[in-house]
Image (spheres, helix red, strand yellow):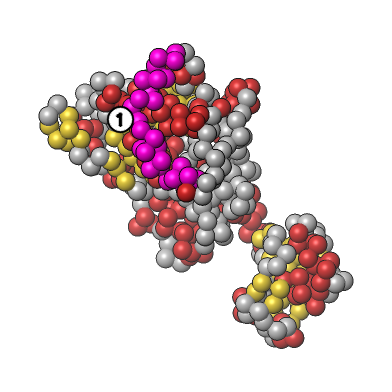
Amino acid sequence: MTSENFSWLHRGVSDIFPHQLDSDNITENIEQFCRKCDRPLRVKLGIDPTGTDLHLGHSIPFRKLRAFQDQGHTAVVIIGDFTAQIGDPTGKDKVRKQLTSEQVKQNAQTYLNQLRPILDFDTPGRLEVRYNSEWLSSLDLGKIQELLATMTVQQMLAKEGFNNRYTQENPIYLHEFLYPLMQGYDSVAVDADIELGGTDQKFNIAVGRDLQRHFDKKPQFGVLLPILIGTDGEQKMSKSLDNYVGLKEDALSMYSKLEKTPDSLLKNYFELLTNLPLSQIPENPREAQKMLAVEVVAQYHGKESALTVQKTALNLVSKQNMANAEAVPEFSLNSVDFPAKLFYILNASGLVNSSGEGRRQIQGGSVRLDGDRISDPNYTIENSTDLNNKIVQVGKKKFIRLTNK
C-alpha cells in the first residue's frame, strides 16, 4: 500500500513511538509495518472543536494525515464532540470551561469547512469523519469503571499538566482524569493503526495504545508532529498571542503575514507547511519569504489568487507606489536618541501631535511600519539603521519616510 521511499513519512516528524513494535512475536518498525500491510492503514487524528478558528499550527498534523491519504491509507478524523465537553487538560494550568453540545456541533462544522483545502474529502475510502459521542455517550457505568481501572492516580499525575497543577496546588477535577481515557478509547473504537498528534499529545496517544492492548487489539504507532512557532519567532502560534495565520483569512492577509516570516523560521515553515524539497529554498531570505507566502496561500486560495495578492502586496509596500512616493515627506533620524519608542518618533516626525496621541494610535491599530501593523504601544527600535528608508503610516493618509541623512 505504500511506496518504498518513506521520506514523506519522516518529513517534519518529531518522534515515532514505539521505535519497534512487537507484532505476532516479530519485532517491526513503522516502515516494515506499512510495507507488509495488505490493506489501507487506519490513521487516526482527533480534534476537539473547542473554538471556531484554525490556524497554520493546527494544519501540521492534518497535512501529515493527507500524506497518508496520498499513499493510499484511510484518514480517520475524530471530531471530539463528546470529549470537547470535558476539555483536554493538556498544557492548561486550570480547568477548561465546559461547552454545550450545541456549541460543539457548530464549531465542528466550522472546523471541517476549514480542513477541506488540506484533506481529500472526495476519493472513496480515503476519509472517515467520526464523532466520538457515537461510542462514548453510550458507555455505561460498568465500562467507565473498567476504563478507570486501567490507570492509577500516580500515572495520571505523571502527566505534565496534572503534575504542575498538583504541585502548585491548583484544583484538578475528577472528570478531567476521564479525558485521556476517553480520547484513548477512541483508538479502540476505530481500530487505529497509527495516531497522529502534536508533541504535547504523547501521553494521550500512549493511553490509546494501552487501552487497545487492554481490549485485545493491536496497539497503534504514535507519530508526533512539532508545535509551530508563531510569526513573532518566539512563542507557539496562538490566536491569543496575535502571532498566527488563520486558515480562514483572506489571501492578502495570509500573504502579508507569511512574507515577513523571520529568517530563523523559514526552513521550519517550508518543511512543515509545504511539500517543496528543502533544496529548492532560495538562499536569499527575502526571496524565500515570498516563495513561502505564495506556496502556502496557494494551498488555501489557489495559485492564481496567490500570485495576484503577491503583486498587490508588492504595490502596497513599494516605495514607488505608496502614496506617490515622490510626495512622501522624509524625516531624518539624526535628531533621535536610540533606543527610541515608536510613539516618540511619531511625535518627533509630526505624524501625531503628542507622544500620548502616538501611543493611542498604536493601540488602536492605526500605525504601520513598512506595511506591518504595530500594536505594542511600547514598541522600541534599537538603532536608526533598523528604520532607514522605511515608511511609517498613521491612518490611511499620513505617511513619512525615515532616513539616516
Q: Is residue 219 shown left or right of residue 139? A: left
| Residue 107 in sight | no
Residue closer to the observer: 78 or 374: 78
Location of the C terminus (image quadrant): bottom right
Q: Which residue is mark 1?
A: 210
Q: Residue 43 appears in which quarter of the rendering?
A: top left
Position above or below: 45 against 60: above
User: Residue at (73%, 64%) from the top-left corner?
Assistant: 377
Task: Determine the residue located farthest toward the front in the rendered image.
Answer: 169
State whether the magenta stretch is mostly helix, strand or loop.
helix
How many numbered marks are there? Answer: 1
Q: Position of residue 21 (x, y in %)?
A: 20, 35
**Label 1 environment density (alpha carbons within 10 Å; few <14, some 14–19, many ≥20):** many
As helix, strand or loop, the secondary structure at mark 1 comes to helix
Q: What is the magenta range?
A: 140-166
Position above or below: 389 against 304: below
Q: Residue 311 appears in which quarter of the rendering?
A: bottom right
